[in-house]
């Protein structure tokens, strides 16, 4: 019995020892975990302090930036307005209120524009309808983050006034130059007319001579009349009126005016139309006159002793071609052509190499073409003829270009 009890006590002591051993290991593990936890907390605390420091710095920087921006906005001479996604003014600087003459905070921008501003001929520029007559330039930028817009408002009243003044001064200077040129141009035919008219006063002048002098007076006066008419066309500058016209109709009209002149001077004349049904828009009469003027010059270059040796028969071609939204009219001749020095001065008012020329034809033609948004150009060499190209924007709409080229010879002289 005692032995059994002794055995049981031994077993119990063994279990207890094992339990102590397990307990010791568990407390060691716990102590280890606690230490690593403490280390992690220390690490996280350090990271947090770092992040806090960074955030504080960023906050301070942002505050300083805000302050600077606010100062900048207040000091800016241009008006700045921030619109929300609904187009309502969220914020506006003092310059915006000063330029617009009203507090626009909280107002719907589009509604404000309608009541206080009216558009001008210059895109993006408006005139104030109230108060002083001021002009403002308004531009907008989308704000991707908020869906709103940033509106910039500039007072361009003074700039506009200076621009208008400078354009006026330029016009006056050009007119002054032209007046001097005209006086110079008029002097010669006037002196000649006076000379012939003086001769007519002589009662003993033979009848034949009297008739000749009379004809000369009329001729010189006609030249002066021509000069003054061209001068007026040039001085008016702008071409008014705008109608859409098929290119083929314009070609036919110019050809109809010119064909009898070519026939009379025995010069070959051909018209070819590759306009594919395109149309141009503008002043029909002015465009037709510009084309006829180019052809009259070509006629002069082919005749008037102009045709180069070895090329006895003059030929003039009027053509039109439609290419990528543009129409190119060409007047080609096989006349005397011209050197580079003449080409450089061609479009100068009063530049002429003809005894009876006014030197205004090409200056007027260029003015007309420019007023229609086009350009005029020349290619030529001495004794190798000349090609004048007149390019105009084709107008969209009524006359859609045809797919198939329609090449036609409209008229042929000789
Ligand atoms: P004008 O015909 O009164 O002389 P323009 O301005 O029409 O005035 O022409 C200026 C000058 O350009 C002409 O005098 C001539 O010398 C030159 N010119 C114009 N067209 C041609 C041409 N097709 N061939 C050669 N010279 C030309």
Image (spheres, rainbow, N blue to C red):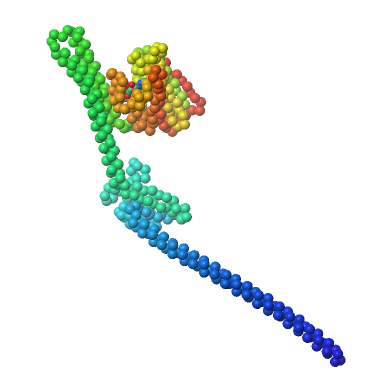
Q: Position of residue 212 (x, y in %)?
A: 21, 11
| Residue occupying image coordinates x 29% and y 48% | 134
In the image, residue 116 sits, relative to residue 393, either above or below, namely below
| Residue occupying image coordinates x 37% and y 24% | 340
Choose between 66 and 41: the one closer to the eye.
Answer: 41
In the image, residue 115 sits, relative to residue 395, either above or below, namely below
In the image, residue 87 sits, relative to residue 332, either above or below, namely below
In this picture, residue 120 sits left or right of residue 181: right
Q: Please state, as top left, top right, bottom left or bottom right, where the N terminus lies in the image.
A: bottom right
In this picture, residue 311 sits left or right of residue 100: right
Q: Position of residue 287 (x, y in %)?
A: 36, 27
Q: Is residue 248 visible?
A: no
Q: Position of residue 407 (x, y in %)?
A: 47, 22
Quadrant of the image occupied by residue 391: top left
Q: Is residue 42 visible?
A: yes
Q: Please state, as top left, top right, bottom left or bottom right, where the C terminus lies in the image.
A: top left
Q: Position of residue 265 (x, y in %)?
A: 35, 13
| Residue occupying image coordinates x 23% and y 28% | 180
In this picture, residue 51 sits left or right of residue 114: right
């Amino acid at each position: 019995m005692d032995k059994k009890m002794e055995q049981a006590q031994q077993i119990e002591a063994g279990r207890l020892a094992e339990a102590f051993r397990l307990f010791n290991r568990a407390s060691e593990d716990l102590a280890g975990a606690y230490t690593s936890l403490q280390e992690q907390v220390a690490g996280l605390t350090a990271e947090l302090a770092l992040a806090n420091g960074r955030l504080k710095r960023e906050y301070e920087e942002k505050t300083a930036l805000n302050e600077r921006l606010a100062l900048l906005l207040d000091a800016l001479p241009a008006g700045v307005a921030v619109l929300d996604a609904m187009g309502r003014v969220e914020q506006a600087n003092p310059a915006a209120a000063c330029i617009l003459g009203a507090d626009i905070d909280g107002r719907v921008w589009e509604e404000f524009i309608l009541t206080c501003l009216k558009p001008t001929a210059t895109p993006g520029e408006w005139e104030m309808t109230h108060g002083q007559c001021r002009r403002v330039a308004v531009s907008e930028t989308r704000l991707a983050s908020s869906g709103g817009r940033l509106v910039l408002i500039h007072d361009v009243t003074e700039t506009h006034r200076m621009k208008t003044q400078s354009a006026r001064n330029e016009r006056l200077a050009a007119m002054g130059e032209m007046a001097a040129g005209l006086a110079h141009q008029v002097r010669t035919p006037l002196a000649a007319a006076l000379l012939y008219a003086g001769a007519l006063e002589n009662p003993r002048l033979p009848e034949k001579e009297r008739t000749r002098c009379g004809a000369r007076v009329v001729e010189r006066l006609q030249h002066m009349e021509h000069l003054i008419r061209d001068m007026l066309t040039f001085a008016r500058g702008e071409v008014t009126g705008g109608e859409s016209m098929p290119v083929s109709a314009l070609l036919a009209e110019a050809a109809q005016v010119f064909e009898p002149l070519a026939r009379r001077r025995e010069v070959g004349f051909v018209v070819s139309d590759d306009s594919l049904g395109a149309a141009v828009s503008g002043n029909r009469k002015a465009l037709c006159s510009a084309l006829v003027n180019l052809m009259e010059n070509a006629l002069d270059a082919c005749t008037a002793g102009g045709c180069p040796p070895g090329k006895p028969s003059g030929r003039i071609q009027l053509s039109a071609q439609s290419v990528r939204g543009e129409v190119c009219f060409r007047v080609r001749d096989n006349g005397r052509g011209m050197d580079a020095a003449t080409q450089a001065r061609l479009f100068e008012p009063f530049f002429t190499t003809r005894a009876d020329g006014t030197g205004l034809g090409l200056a007027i033609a260029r003015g007309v073409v420019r007023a229609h948004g086009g350009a005029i150009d020349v290619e030529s060499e001495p004794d190798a003829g000349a090609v004048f190209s007149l390019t105009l924007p084709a107008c969209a709409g009524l006359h859609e270009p045809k797919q198939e080229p329609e090449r036609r010879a409209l008229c042929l002289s000789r």
